[in-house]
Image: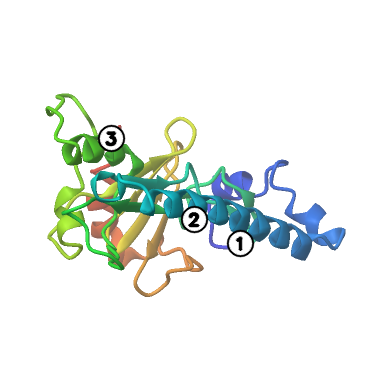
């Protein structure tokens, strides 16, 4: 109810089909099928890693696991990706680098998949390449609590962007409509704070970091 019309249009597009899944009683089956797909994929990854552990390359191989986008399973009446909310823009990103990472550690800093290439190049000892938008994540791989001021930015269709910091998730659409979520207090993004006048300064600071916004 607190979303701008353009966000509603994206969420309730024909490809989303939430009403169809609900009306036909297939919501539970669809979630079950999705979880089955994840389980199958996890097993195959496990087989590959088991083989690596048994190989002579176990201690000199860098492993990086990621996926291309997140996925809604009915949250906000939305299915698939095609959105700028946390469910659609949050993906697995796992690194294992001998001599750099430590097992069973997790980093909560916001980063982007645009950082994967410069990170792998850095870990592999390749020469630095100029002109990249991404940066190496080595500092965070060495210390998940290291200081990190860089936000993560995602884009869906022309002029629609979102920006993550450790505290905020800000969305700005090509028509100027906005969404703002407090990630600490509202991790499921149920309450849009964009119309809160006390947060105007926060929105201005976040918007200034987006492409094409001043």
- Density class for disc 2 (Cα within 10 Å; few <14, some 14-19, many ≥20) is few
- Check residue 117 in the rendering and tell me which mark sits there, or answer none: 3
Left or right: 72 as drawn, with respect to 89: right
Residue 19 pos. (x, y %): 78, 55
- Depth check, mark 2 against mark 3: the one in front is 2
* Lower position in the chain sequence, tag 2 or tag 1: 2
Secondary structure at badge 3 equals helix
Between 56 and 137, the one nearer to me in the picture: 56
**Which colour assignment does the render follow?**
rainbow
Residue drawn at 87 percent across, 58 percent down: 24
Residue drawn at 30 percent across, 44 percent down: 57
Residue 61 pos. (x, y %): 28, 44
The answer, for residue 90, to whether it is visible in the render is no
What is the quadrant of residue 74 in the picture? bottom right
Are circles 2 and 3 on residues that touch, CB within 8 Å? no
Residue drawn at 46 percent across, 38 percent down: 175
The residue wearing badge 2 is: 46
The residue most toward the right is 24
Q: Quadrant of the C terminus?
A: top left
* Distance from the alpha carbon under mark 2 to that under mark 1: 29 Å
- Depth check, mark 2 against mark 1: the one in front is 2
Q: Is 121 rendered above or below residue 105? A: above
The residue wearing badge 1 is: 75
């Amino acid at each position: 109810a607190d979303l701008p019309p353009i966000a509603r249009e994206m969420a309730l597009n024909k490809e989303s089909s939430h009403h169809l899944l609900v009306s036909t009683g297939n919501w539970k089956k669809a979630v079950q099928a999705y979880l089955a797909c994840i389980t199958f994929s996890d097993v195959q990854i496990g087989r590959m890693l088991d083989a690596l552990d048994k190989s002579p390359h176990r201690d000199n191989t860098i492993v990086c696991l990621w996926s291309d986008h997140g996925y809604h399973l009915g949250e906000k009446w939305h299915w698939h990706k095609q959105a700028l909310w946390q469910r659609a823009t949050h993906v697995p990103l796992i690194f294992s680098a001998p001599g750099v990472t430590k097992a069973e550690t997790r980093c909560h800093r916001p980063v982007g998949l645009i950082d994967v290439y410069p990170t792998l190049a850095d870990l592999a000892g390749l020469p630095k390449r100029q002109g990249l938008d991404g940066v190496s994540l080595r500092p965070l791989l060495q210390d998940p609590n290291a200081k990190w001021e860089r936000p993560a930015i995602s884009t869906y269709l022309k002029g629609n962007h979102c920006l993550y910091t450790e505290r905020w998730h800000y969305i700005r659409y090509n028509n100027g409509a906005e969404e703002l979520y407090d990630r600490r207090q509202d991790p499921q993004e149920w309450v849009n704070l964009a119309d809160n006048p006390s947060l105007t300064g926060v929105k201005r600071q976040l918007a200034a970091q987006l492409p094409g916004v001043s």
